[in-house]
Image: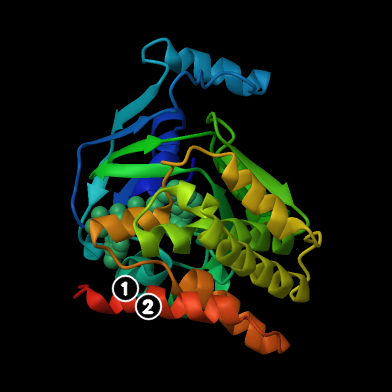
Amino acid sequence: MSKIAVVGAGAIGCVFGARLAFFTSHEVIFCVRTPFDLVKVTLPSGQDMRVDMHPTKRKNIEEKVRNISLNEISCPVRCETDPSKVSPVDWILLAVKGHQVEGASGWLRALCGSKASIAVLQNGVEHFERVAPFSFGAKILPVVVNCPADRFSPGEVTQNSHAKLIASDSEEGRDLQDIFSKTDLSVELTTDFTTETWSKLCVNVAAGPATAITSAGRGIVSEPSVSNVCYELTKECAEVGRAEGAKLPLDFAEKVIERIHGQPPDGTTSMLADKLAGNPLEADAMTGAVIRYAAKHGISVPTTKTIHAFLMQINQKHDFV
Ligand SMILES: NC(=O)c1ccc[n+]([C@@H]2O[C@H](COP(=O)([O-])OP(=O)(O)OC[C@H]3O[C@@H](n4cnc5c(N)ncnc54)[C@H](OP(=O)(O)O)[C@@H]3O)[C@@H](O)[C@H]2O)c1
């Protein structure tokens, strides 16, 4: 049994932290600013969580699901609001937004020890660089999160589609896989994390900035005047990713945009959700990262620079605390 802390109990922290609290015997602590007694994850409508599951997992889950509704996971959890009340743990699931890492460093200081590992459940490509200054001797495992989710109130979230984590095929990656092995969710291991993380960033920049700037759903990407901007953003991101070693085909940007055209026009993005909630946009971790890596490789990214300037203006217009 491991001791696991969830720092950043929002949409992603709750989707994955709830699985550990519900399905496993790990000791799970939610480190929060606003406490809650119960974590509740509403699953995608019509999804039976036992489908496509490995038989050994299915057995464990079937014992649990006898007592619950198939489209909701909920259980009582331990929340702490004061870092002085916690001590070093084995694993930290860090799921604050990219720009919130420093603000959460008090938690990391209290939870990290030489045996701790931090799974960084964030978008972007700079998981390691962002967290290293606040890791206090713990190991850092960057993780790609595939899971559209929304938070409605403290501890209460909706998972909108299938969820999985992708980590490097490393000792820490295998440990994280083991931690989730008794849940319905999987941790996929890859020997090419660079490609995974840059392809996810391409998907994020394709729709996030356009939806946030216009306050419109994903359908905005199909507007002829906007579509080309989204395509150029994605193409620039893919080019920079390829310079970093990501194996992205030359038509990757076209494919990403085409896929968005086929999605429901009222679909949201996390950047749009932040804009509408009046929260800072995760622009530095997305377009900001593309600009930094472009400079490293001497690649010109004019569309990304223009769009990033607009996103940062949105951030400056709010008095964020
Ligand atoms: N949501 C998605 O669909 C999705 C999908 C894939 C990847 N991602 C990525 O996953 C990461 C997390 O996103 P999210 O959507 O889960 O964000 P979120 O819902 O905004 O959750 C972030 C959580 O961090 C908490 N937090 C921030 N600063 C803190 C501090 N100093 N101490 C304790 N808690 C703190 C916030 O607490 P408060 O409630 O107190 O503000 C909030 O609960 C991001 O990098 C995002 O891009 C998101």
Asked whether the viewer can see residue 94, the reply is no
- Location of residue 240 with respect to 176 vertically, above or below: below
Residue at numbered disc 1: 314
Residue visible at 20% across and 61% down in the picture: 82
Residue 253 x, y percent position in the rendering: 69, 59
Q: Residues within 10 Å of mark 2 (few under 14, many from 20)?
A: some
For badge 2, the amino acid type reads Met
Q: Is residue 45 visible?
A: yes
Which of the image's four quarters has the C terminus? bottom left
Closer to the camera, 281 or 43? 281
Q: Is mark 1 within 8 Å of ligand 1?
A: no
Q: Count how many numbered circles sit on residues in the image.
A: 2
What crowding class fits label 1: few (fewer than 14 Cα within 10 Å), some (14-19), or many (20 or more)? some
**In the rendered image of this protein, does residue 238 appear above or below residue 317?**
above
x, y percentage for residue 291? Answer: 57, 81
The residues bearing labels 1 and 2 have C-alpha atoms spaced at a distance of 5 Å
What residue is drawn where x is 47% and y is 43%?
A: 148
Q: Position of residue 4 (x, y in %)?
A: 43, 49
SS category of the residue bearing label 1: helix
Disc 2: residue Cβ within 8 A of ligand 1's nearest atom: no
Q: In the rendered view, does 258 fall on the left or right side of 116?
A: right
Q: Ligand 1 sits in which quadrant?
A: bottom left
Amino acid marked by disc 1: Ile
| SS for dot 2 | helix
Q: Nearer the viewer, residue 314 or 111?
A: 314
Q: Which mark is residue 312?
A: 2
